[in-house]
């Protein structure tokens, strides 16, 4: 079963607008990652935020983490048609002798469509 | 190659048939993961290798599923006596990190259809 829940399930916007996707999880994490998947392809790592961080930026991406609410959001600014894809949050709560090993639990994803 | 390679890209099997799915991780990558992705869902963890050691197989759905990585590089996921509910995309991912893995590189997956 999947731990993460994402909303919205689908998001449709115009080029140039911002897109915000949210993710919630249930148990404590080592880190939270966002991945992108184009139709019929594998997942591509976008950004990681550690449990002791609150906000990170990477290019047009901004991710926030609120561990008290067990939630995260991904903001894509100035969206482009090429951003059209499915976006997944993934939580790492793995533990092997006190060390994480990268086992990820994925949400169901948000399908983003950016219209030219 | 530069990325994670999976073969075959598509596999059609008759119910009851055995299948073998191959993953070639990025050269030198220590960690290797298998995930199963049903249509319209996020990937679900199956199993994890660190080099040749299978350290976590808690996600394998039944004893019909078996994975190996005998030399710590190429991995094979085998499904015996396939059933229709096994139809999914099987994704392989690798990482250069052994512990505190913070980034996975995914292959394009093998789409398995069981008729």
Image (cartoon, rainbow, N blue to C red):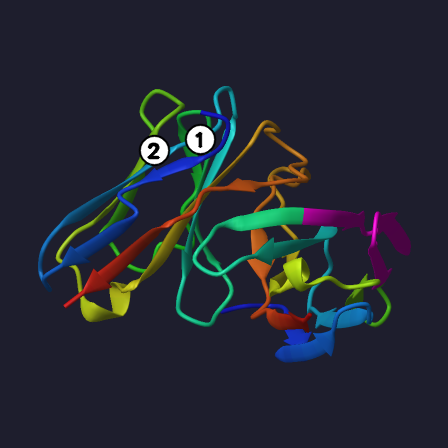
Q: Is residue A50 inside the magenta stretch?
A: yes
Residue sitting at 36 percent across and 57 percent down?
A: B89
- Viewport quadrant of the N terminus of chain B: top left
Q: Is residue A41 visible?
A: yes
In the rendered image, which residue does mark 2 sit on?
B75
Dot 1: element = loop
| Dot 1: chain letter | B
Front in this rendered view, residue A53 or B106? B106
Decide whether the magenta segment is chiefly helix, strand or loop: strand
Q: Is residue A89 visible?
A: no
Left or right: residue A109 compared with residue B40: right
- Viewport quadrant of the C terminus of chain B: bottom left
Give above or below for B101 relative to B109.
above
- Counting from the top left corner in percent of width and height, residue A29 is at 72, 55
Identify the mark at residue A73; answer none if there is no mark: none
Of marks 2 and 1, the one in the foreground? 1
Residue sitting at 34 percent across and 33 percent down?
A: B75
Dot 2: element = strand
Q: Marks 2 and 1: same chain?
A: yes
Q: Residues within 10 Å of mark 1 (few under 14, many from 20)?
A: many
- Counting from the top left corner in percent of width and height, residue A18 is at 82, 69
Q: Which residues make up the magenta segment? A: A46-65
| Dot 2: chain letter | B
Identify the mark at residue B25; answer none if there is no mark: 1
Residue sitting at 73 percent across and 59 percent down?
A: A28
Front in this rendered view, residue B5 or A38? A38
Q: Distance between the Cα atoms at labels 2 and 1?
A: 8 Å
Left or right: residue B48 compared with residue B9: right
């Amino acid at each position: 079963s999947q731990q993460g829940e994402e909303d919205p399930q689908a998001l449709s916007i115009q080029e140039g607008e911002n897109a915000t996707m949210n993710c919630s999880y249930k148990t404590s994490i080592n880190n939270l990652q966002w991945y992108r998947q184009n139709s019929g392809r594998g997942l591509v790592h976008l950004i990681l935020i550690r449990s002791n961080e609150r906000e990170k930026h990477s290019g047009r991406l901004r991710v926030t983490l609120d561990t008290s609410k067990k939630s995260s959001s991904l903001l894509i600014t100035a969206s482009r048609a090429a951003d059209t894809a499915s976006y997944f949050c993934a939580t790492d709560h793995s533990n092997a002798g006190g060390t994480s090993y990268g086992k990820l639990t994925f949400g169901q994803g948000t399908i983003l469509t950016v219209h030219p | 190659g530069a990325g994670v390679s999976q073969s075959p890209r598509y596999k059609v099997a008759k119910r009851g048939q055995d299948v073998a799915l191959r993953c070639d991780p990025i050269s030198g990558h220590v960690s290797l993961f298998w995930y199963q992705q049903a249509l319209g869902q996020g990937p679900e963890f199956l199993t994890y290798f660190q080099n040749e050691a299978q350290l976590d197989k808690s996600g394998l759905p039944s004893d019909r599923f078996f994975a190996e990585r005998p030399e710590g590089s190429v991995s094979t996921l085998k499904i015996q006596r396939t059933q229709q509910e096994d139809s999914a995309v099987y994704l392989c991912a690798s990482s250069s990190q052994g512990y505190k893995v913070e980034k996975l590189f995914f292959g394009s997956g093998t789409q398995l259809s069981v008729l």
